Image (tube, grey):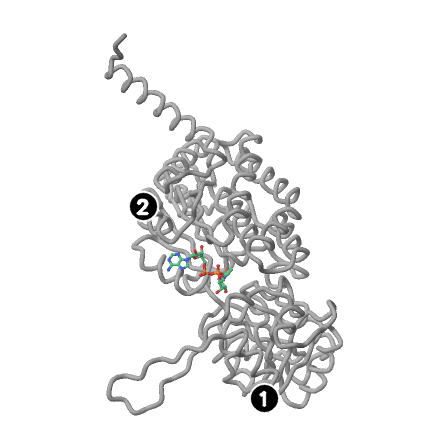
């Protein structure tokens, strides 16, 4: 018997086409082999989403919130296990926070003008397909939060997670997709590639079917999206100072600073990264910080710790230049998000589990102050008065305009720092996390866009304004 080769080719092509079709429909929970497939599936899902009413869209958001709450513990364990960073109990709090306090469709407010010449309306419409690049420090929380906000605004999302938190991020995407489909929504509103990489992110950033980019991460990725030629939302690094003046409730300030700094082992971009305290209350503050979980190191222990958690780079001097090469430092990633107890053990100091933060007094230009350490190591700098404190806080925040915290009862001092530092978030007399709605009023977000100015992003940040004008009608007065 002879086989008709053209028939075989035809059958093979048909089978492959059906496999592809099935992949698009079911999408393996939104996870694809290639970026092109992930974008095409999200584009298709966006078209389906457009057919739903806003009330139906809100139902999908409800289902996403429920799935996030149900899996809060599991995803916290996965994230800590996979990335080797952070604390499970704190990540559980983060997951509940984004499930409960990320705004949904109620965030989209239309505006209207009515008058002699009729009615003009502005509505907030979706961009289409958003490319969302997410960090390793909050892998599940950022996917939940951006997923809710972006879908509430009517978009589909292609995620580009950090490769070191790949499994956690992809699991969250799949589970949220399943919840959406169960609630009557389209498959693949959230997609990603099975093997996230810098190359795949680059393909996404230049893909013609991606309408908006949102980068949540350090300076490199923010620069990359802002240079992409597409509209971009950049949520970048912070180095938040906590300033304490002589009028503060010092015991409360110490407790709040330790709580904020140690939350998820200092991974949040909003967490206290250095303390600047007016000299007259410094000893009292440091003594209370030790009472609430700080462990003070000094002298050679600080130098030994610096050798462990920082790597030194010598910037090459220019040719013919006689000046000594300038030293600069990079954070040793092996210690990012690790427990204080573990970090201290690396310099031979053993402490009980109750120790949450390593504290030390340093000079204002110490690398612990300058670098964004993202670990529970907190330098404390003494200054002579509030003016010196403000000057230093502005300097070490590096113009990120991200977050600052201040403990004071002097309204003039609080106002002076807030005006000078121009941060997106300014927290008064509370731990930093009050700024994203934990123990403070207001909604939450894990994408705080200082560089591009959207601030604390929510559904409306992911919309385009659209104006509809009806002339000489529908004004009823
Ligand atoms: P990271 O910058 O290393 O990575 C973030 C994401 O960007 C990852 O998905 C990574 O793969 C990708 N990426 C990195 N460089 C890139 C490049 N050149 N081109 C394309 N993609 C690139 O950051 P991280 O360690 O995952 O997260 C910590 C950093 O993120 C800190 O600086 C922290 O302050 C910041 N952060 C900011 C916010 C915010 O809302 N502003 C929230 C969380 C974290």
Q: Is mark 2 within 8 Å of ligand 1?
A: no
Question: Is 223 left or right of 362, judged from the image as shown?
Answer: left
> Which comes before the other along the chain, label 2 or label 1?
2
Image quadrant assignment for residue 24: top left
Structural crowding at the residue carrying mark 1, measured as other residues with C-alpha within 10 Å and reported as few (<14), some (14–19) or many (≥20):
many
Foreground residue among 186 and 435: 186
Number of labels in the image equals 2
- Residue 423 visible in the snapshot: no
Give the x, y percent position of residue 371: 49, 75
Give the x, y percent position of residue 129: 40, 42
User: Can you tell which mark lies on residue 383?
Assistant: 1
From the viewer's perspective, is residue 440 above or below residue 30? below
User: Can you tell which mark lies on residue 170?
Assistant: none
Instruction: Please tell me whether mark 2 sits on a helix, a strand or a loop.
Output: loop
Question: Is 391 left or right of 292, judged from the image as shown?
Answer: left
Q: Check contact, mark 2 vs mark 1: CB within 8 A.
A: no
Give the x, y percent position of residue 233: 41, 56
Question: Is 418 left or right of 283, judged from the image as shown?
Answer: left
Q: CA distance from mark 2 to mark 1?
A: 50 Å
Q: Which residue is mark 2?
A: 207
The residue sitting at the top extreme is: 1
Foreground residue among 246 and 168: 168
From the viewer's perspective, is residue 376 above or below residue 323? above
Residue drawn at x 51%, y 44% is 170
- Residue 409 visible in the snapshot: yes
Give the x, y percent position of residue 471: 35, 39
Q: Is mark 1 within 8 Å of ligand 1?
A: no
Instruction: Please tell me whether mark 1 sits on a helix, a strand or a loop.
Output: strand
Q: Indicate the quadrant containing the N terminus: top left, top right, bottom left or bottom right.
A: top left
Residue drawn at x 51%, y 56% is 136
């Amino acid at each position: 018997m002879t086989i008709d080769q053209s028939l075989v080719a035809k059958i093979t092509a048909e089978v492959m086409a059906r496999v592809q079709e099935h992949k698009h429909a079911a999408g393996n929970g939104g996870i694809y082999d290639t970026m092109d497939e992930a974008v095409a599936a999200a584009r298709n899902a966006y078209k389906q989403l457009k057919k739903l009413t806003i009330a139906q869209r809100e139902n999908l958001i409800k289902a996403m919130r429920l799935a996030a709450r149900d899996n809060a513990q599991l995803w916290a364990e996965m994230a800590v296990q996979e990335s080797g960073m952070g604390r499970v109990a704190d990540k559980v709090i983060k997951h509940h926070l984004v499930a409960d306090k990320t705004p949904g469709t109620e965030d989209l407010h239309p505006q209207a003008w009515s008058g002699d010449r009729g009615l003009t309306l502005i509505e907030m419409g979706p961009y289409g397909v958003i490319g969302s690049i997410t960090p390793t420090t909050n892998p599940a929380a950022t996917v939940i939060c951006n997923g809710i906000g972006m879908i509430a605004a009517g978009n589909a999302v292609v995620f580009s997670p950090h490769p070191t938190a790949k499994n956690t991020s992809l699991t969250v995407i799949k589970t949220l997709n399943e919840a959406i489909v169960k609630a009557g929504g389209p498959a693949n509103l959230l997609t990603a590639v099975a093997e996230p990489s810098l190359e795949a992110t680059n393909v996404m950033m230049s893909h013609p079917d991606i309408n908006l980019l949102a980068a949540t991460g350090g300076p490199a990725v923010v620069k990359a999206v802002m240079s992409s030629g597409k509209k971009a939302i950049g949520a970048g690094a912070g180095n938040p100072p906590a300033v304490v003046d002589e009028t503060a409730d010092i015991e409360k300030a110490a407790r709040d600073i330790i709580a904020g700094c140690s939350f998820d082992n200092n991974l949040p971009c909003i967490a206290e990264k250095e303390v600047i305290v007016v000299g007259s209350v410094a000893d009292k503050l440091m003594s209370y910080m030790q009472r609430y979980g700080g462990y003070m190191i000094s002298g050679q222990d600080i130098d030994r710790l610096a050798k462990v958690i920082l790597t030194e780079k010598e910037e090459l001097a220019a040719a013919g230049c006689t000046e000594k090469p300038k030293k600069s430092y990079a954070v040793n990633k092996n210690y990012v998000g690790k427990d204080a107890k573990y970090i201290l053990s690396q310099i031979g100091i053993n402490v009980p589990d109750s120790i949450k933060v390593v504290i030390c007094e340093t000079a204002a230009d110490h690398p612990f102050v300058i670098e964004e350490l993202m670990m529970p190591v907190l330098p404390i700098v003494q200054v002579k008065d509030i003016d010196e404190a403000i000057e230093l806080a502005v300097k070490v925040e590096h113009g990120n305009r991200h977050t600052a915290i201040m403990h004071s009862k002097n309204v003039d001092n609080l106002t002076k720092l807030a005006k000078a530092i121009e941060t997106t978030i300014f927290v008064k007399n509370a731990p930093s996390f009050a700024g994203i709605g934990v123990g403070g009023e207001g909604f939450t977000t894990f994408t705080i866009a200082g560089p591009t100015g959207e601030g604390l992003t929510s559904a409306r940040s992911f919309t385009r304004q659209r104006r509809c004008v009806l002339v000489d009608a529908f004004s009823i007065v």
